[in-house]
Image (spheres, helix red, strand yellow):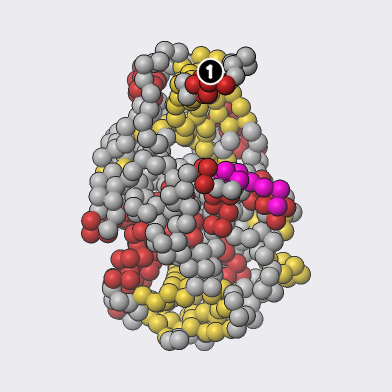
Amino acid sequence: MDNVYDAIVIGSGIAGGWAAKELAEKGLKVLMLERGRNIEHVKDYVNANKDPWMFEYRGQRTREMIETHPVLKRDYPLNEKVLDMWCNDLESPYIEDKRFDWYRGYHLGGRSLLWGRQSYRWNKWDFEANAKEGIAVDWPIRYDDLAPWYSYVEKFAGIQGSYEGLDVLPDSEFLPAMEMNIVEKDIANNLKKKFNGSRHMFIGRSANITQPKPEQNRVNCQYRNKCWLGCPYGAYFSTQSSTLPAAKATGNLSIEVNKIVTRILYDKDKKKATGVEVLDAINNQTYEFKSKIVFVCASAFNSTWVLMNSATDIWPDGLGSASGQLGHNVMDHHFRCGAGGTVEGYEEYIEYGSRPTGIYIPRFRNVYNDKRNYLRGFGYQGGAGRGRGVEVAELLGKEFKEAKFQPNKWYIGITGFGEMLPYHENTIKLDKEKKDKWGLPVLRMDVEMKENEHNMRKDMMADAKEMLEATGVKDVYDYDWGYAPGMGIHEMGTARMGRDPKTSVLNGNNQVWEATNVFVTDGACMTSASCVNPSLTYMALTARAADFAVKELKKMNL
């Protein structure tokens, strides 16, 4: 086992895959370290071609699953189809001072094999809001700094969507868009008319390719909507389908699975990292790997865990803790509230296939002249569809069976996704008393929504109901199913970027202030959260940081 590399990448999810690709393609010898098992593209997608009746429990959860997955059971991730794709709660516990639902994917590819694939650029206001409102600290970059990197990653990953020309949601480099169904199209037109062009509804932008990418050996989407079972066609962007093959093709990438990074090795005289220490998850042996630079992409909280567990002889709270911000400013996207209803007519229309994305309604609150009793805003995801199965209690036998195949009414539902502010008191910390399966300290969560988010949720429901009623939807109801931080699976913050080492963990190039050859480019680096899905921004930030790192290495500045 070689232990000296130009670069080490911790983690193999969306950010880690991009870091490995970019660094390897630029000529560096790269080691990717993944704490979980290997998953090989196509071969290891064991459930990808199964129909519901092929599963012993028809894809549902069992009593045993509920007992052995105390966190995962709280929401939809716990089911038979993807059980082996989520980490074991009992092996990797954490402490909740306040409820936090932490859903983790410990395997090669991480949550790039499980993500919802919704891909949106931030707008210019997202990078300016903190400074203008006096919230937390200012972002050290602006939209124009990231725009060319958005374009760069979009062209490679493959993002389908429609060009809308909106300031609030900038267009991407799109592949041809998937089509809205007839009901969605009509409601979208009605929405624009009823609100004088101020509200928009269009196809949800997603990392599902609608044209083949033969150079990546990826085939266009087959409309199976089985994405999170692993796509044998490579039709959605993941580490396995896209960035990893590109990195491997260079001959510069080595991968070690079942290797838990326990700390970053730090030279206090040189003020630089020298590599990492890892624990083998199978044999419990400890190894060291050396490198010139380290990219920390282990997912937001695990990346911060690594920093917290590093250089504690110099900084008791870990590498990057000098500002007092490491582990603070936790964010997620709050959701699970909105509205739904039925749509009359359209009985002559049915849908074919299973489109792997819905619709999107971009933010319209606290933009331009709109002012609310809370800061920031929200967007909506959802869609219209037609169920099957007419319920008639008196039917039996043949008539009952035939009724089950009859198309039902059209319905539509929209769910708001809102921005959470970066509160300093929302924290994660190392708990030195409780240990995981490998004897490592676990995280303690203390995170909650505050008045700003609660006020926002009222509008998320009321606006959803108003829009559906205005566009002709019948029997409209609103709902709030309740939300706990973490449920959005968009955990962010804890190692924020900033302009001053006294108030942030990272600088504008994603470097740790106290160790400039350490880069953090996943959700941990986020200074605010916007209201759109964050993964596309992680990709852009990672590609940008990798480009900077290689240039600095060549200048011998790292």
Q: Is residue 60 magenta?
A: yes
Q: Is residue 121 visible?
A: no
Looking at the image, which residue sits at the far front? 397
Residue 520 pos. (x, y %): 47, 65
Residue 369 pos. (x, y %): 43, 27
From the viewer's perspective, is 500 left or right of 249? right
Answer with the quarter of the image where residue 442 lies. bottom right
Residue 61 pos. (x, y %): 64, 46
Relative to the observer, which residue lies in front, 431 or 327?
431
Q: Is residue 492 above or below residue 374?
A: below
Residue at image mark 1: 399
Q: Secondary structure at mark 1?
A: helix
Looking at the image, which residue sits at the far right? 433
Task: Find the magenta span and give its range.
Answer: 57-64
Relative to the observer, which residue lies in front, 230 or 519?
230
Q: Is residue 458 above or below residue 304?
A: above
